C-alpha cells in the first residue's frame, strides 16, 4: 500500500497552499479541488496551474454540485479542508457540511481533516460575541463528522506567524511597528507562534498516523511557546532597535471593540482570548490529544528569531 492519496479542498488559500506544498514534498499523490466558481480570479488559477507544474492533479468540483464532490472524494484516501474561517477575507466554514455529506456518501475516506488550524474550538464554549461564531461553526462541523463516523484528525495550529508574529501581535497590520508597540496587559501571557510551513509539515505527518486517528493534534513546540514580550525582545535584538511599549488593560482592549466592524470585533475577541486569557496554553493536553513536536521530533521547526529575520 503506497502513501495515501490526498485531496486538499481550499488549496489556493493561505494555509491551503502550504498544505498542498507539504503534501507534494512528502511524496503523496496530491489532488487539489478546482472550483468553477473561481471564474476570473486569475491568481487562483495561476496557483492551481503552479500546483500542476509541481506534480499535483486538479479535480473539478463545486460546493454547488454534490455529485462533483462525491466523485472528487472517491479518488483519494485523505481529505484535508482549509476552508476560510470568519475573517476579513471570507467566511464559509459551514460549507464544509456539504463536504462531510460527500465523504459520508463516498464511504472510502480513511481520514478527514476539517478546517481547524487555530484555537481548539472545543475549549471556547465561553468565547465572546461575535468572534465565538468561528468556534461554534467549527463545532457544528465536528458534530457532523462524528455523527457520520468519519475518521478524523483535528489540527490545533495556534498562531500563524504571518498574522501574529511578523506584526508583533498588533491588530490591523502584518508588519512590525516602527516606534511603539501595544502590549496586551504586561505582555506576559504565553502563546504559541508557528511558521505556517511547519503547521503544514506536521499536518501531513499526521494524516497516515494511527496515533492521530480520531484525535486532536496540538502544535505546541516548546521553543515557540512565547509571551508577546519575549517575541518583542527577539525582534529588538534582530532589528537592533528598542520599541516604546504601551500596555493596554483588558478592559480598555475590550472597550475598543465598540465602533469596529464585524471583522474587527471578531479579531479583538479572538486576540482577547489569546493574549489576556492565554487560551492556547492554559491547559494540559489530555487523553484525546497529542502534541506534534513530540510525535514528529524529526521536523526541525522554525524558531521565531529565524521567522522574524525576513521582516528586518
Ligand atoms: P482563506 O481565506 O485563505 O480561504 C481558504 C479557502 O477557502 C479559499 O482558498 C477557498 O478555496 C475556500 N473558500 C472561501 N470561500 C469559499 C466559498 N464560498 N466556496 C468554496 N470555497 C471557499 O483561509 P485561511 O487560510 O485564512 O483560513 C483557513 C483556516 O485557518 C480557517 O479555519 C481559519 O480559522 C484558520 N486560520 C487560523 C489562523 C491562525 O493564526 N491560527 C490564521 C488564519 C486562519 P479555493 O482554494 O478552492 O478557492
Ligand atoms: C486568526 C487577525 C489578525 C484578526 C485563531 C484581526 C481562528 C483561530 C489562533 O483570520 O481573528 O491583524 O487561533 O486585525 O482559532 C485573524 C484570525 C487574525 C485572521 C483571528 C485566527 C486565529 C482564527 C489581525 C486582525 C493582524
Image (cartoon, rainbow, N blue to C red):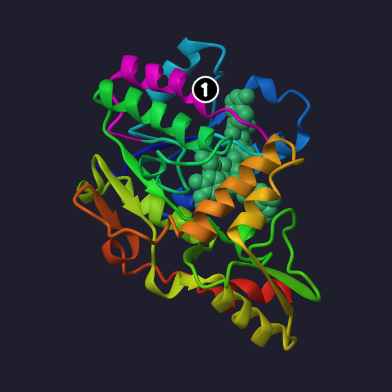
- On whether ligand 1 comes within 8 Å of the CB at mark 1, the answer is yes
Residue at image location 33% in from the left, 51% down from the top: 217
In magenta segment, residue 89: yes
Give the image quarter of residue 4: top left
Nearest the camera: 176 or 183?
Answer: 183
Query: Measured from the top left, where is residue 120 in percent x and y?
Result: 40, 46
**Ligand 1 quadrant in view:** top right
In magenta segment, residue 167: no
Query: Measured from the top left, where is residue 162 in percent x and y?
Result: 63, 58
Query: Measured from the top left, where is residue 123 in percent x and y?
Result: 37, 45
Task: Please indicate whether residue 214 sits to the left or right of residue 61 in the image.
Answer: left
Residue at image location 68% in from the left, 45% down from the top: 257
Dot 1: within a 10 Å radius of its alpha carbon, few (fewer than 14), some, or many (20 or more) residues? some
Residue 18 visible at all: no
Residue occupied by mark 1: 95
Nearest the camera: 47 or 81?
Answer: 81
Residue at image location 61% in from the left, 55% down from the top: 251
Nearest the camera: 232 or 17?
Answer: 232
| Mark 1 secondary-structure assignment | helix
Query: Measured from the top left, where is residue 208 in percent x and y?
Result: 28, 46
Residue 311 visible at all: yes
- Locate the N terminus by quadrant: top left
Residue at image location 52% in from the left, 29% down from the top: 93
- Looking at the rendered structure, the number of numbered marks drawn on it comes to 1
The magenta region covers 88-112
Amino acid at each position: 500500500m503506497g502513501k495515501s492519496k490526498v485531496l486538499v479542498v481550499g488549496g489556493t488559500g493561505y494555509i491551503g497552499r502550504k498544505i498542498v506544498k507539504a503534501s507534494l514534498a512528502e511524496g503523496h499523490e496530491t489532488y487539489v479541488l478546482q472550483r468553477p466558481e473561481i471564474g476570473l480570479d486569475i491568481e487562483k488559477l495561476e496557483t492551481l496551474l503552479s500546483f500542476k507544474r509541481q506534480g499535483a492533479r486538479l479535480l473539478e468540483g463545486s460546493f454547488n454540485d454534490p455529485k462533483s464532490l462525491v466523485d472528487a472524494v472517491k479518488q483519494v484516501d485523505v481529505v484535508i479542508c482549509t476552508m476560510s474561517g470568519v475573517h476579513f477575507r471570507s467566511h464559509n466554514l459551514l460549507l464544509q457540511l456539504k463536504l462531510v455529506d460527500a465523504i459520508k456518501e463516498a464511504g472510502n475516506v480513511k481520514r478527514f481533516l476539517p478546517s481547524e488550524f487555530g484555537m481548539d474550538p472545543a475549549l471556547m464554549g465561553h468565547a465572546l460575541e461575535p468572534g465565538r461564531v468561528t468556534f461554534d461553526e467549527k463545532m457544528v462541523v465536528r458534530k457532523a463528522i462524528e455523527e457520520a463516523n468519519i475518521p478524523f484528525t483535528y489540527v490545533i495550529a495556534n498562531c500563524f506567524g504571518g498574522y501574529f508574529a511578523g506584526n508583533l501581535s498588533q491588530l490591523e497590520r502584518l508588519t512590525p511597528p516602527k516606534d511603539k508597540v501595544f502590549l496586551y496587559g504586561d505582555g506576559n501571557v504565553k502563546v504559541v507562534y508557528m511558521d505556517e510551513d511547519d503547521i503544514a509539515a506536521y499536518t501531513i505527518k499526521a494524516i497516515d498516523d494511527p496515533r492521530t486517528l480520531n484525535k486532536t493534534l496540538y502544535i505546541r513546540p516548546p521553543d515557540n511557546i512565547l509571551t508577546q514580550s519575549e517575541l518583542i525582545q527577539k525582534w529588538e535584538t534582530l532589528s537592533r532597535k528598542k520599541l516604546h511599549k504601551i500596555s493596554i488593560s483588558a478592559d480598555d482592549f475590550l472597550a475598543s471593540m465598540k465602533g469596529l466592524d464585524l471583522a474587527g470585533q471578531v479579531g479583538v475577541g479572538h486576540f482577547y482570548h489569546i493574549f489576556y486569557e492565554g487560551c492556547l496554553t492554559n491547559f494540559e493536553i489530555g487523553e484525546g490529544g497529542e502534541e506534534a513536536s513530540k510525535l514528529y521530533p524529526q521536523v526541525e521547526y522554525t524558531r521565531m528569531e529565524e521567522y522574524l529575520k525576513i521582516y528586518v
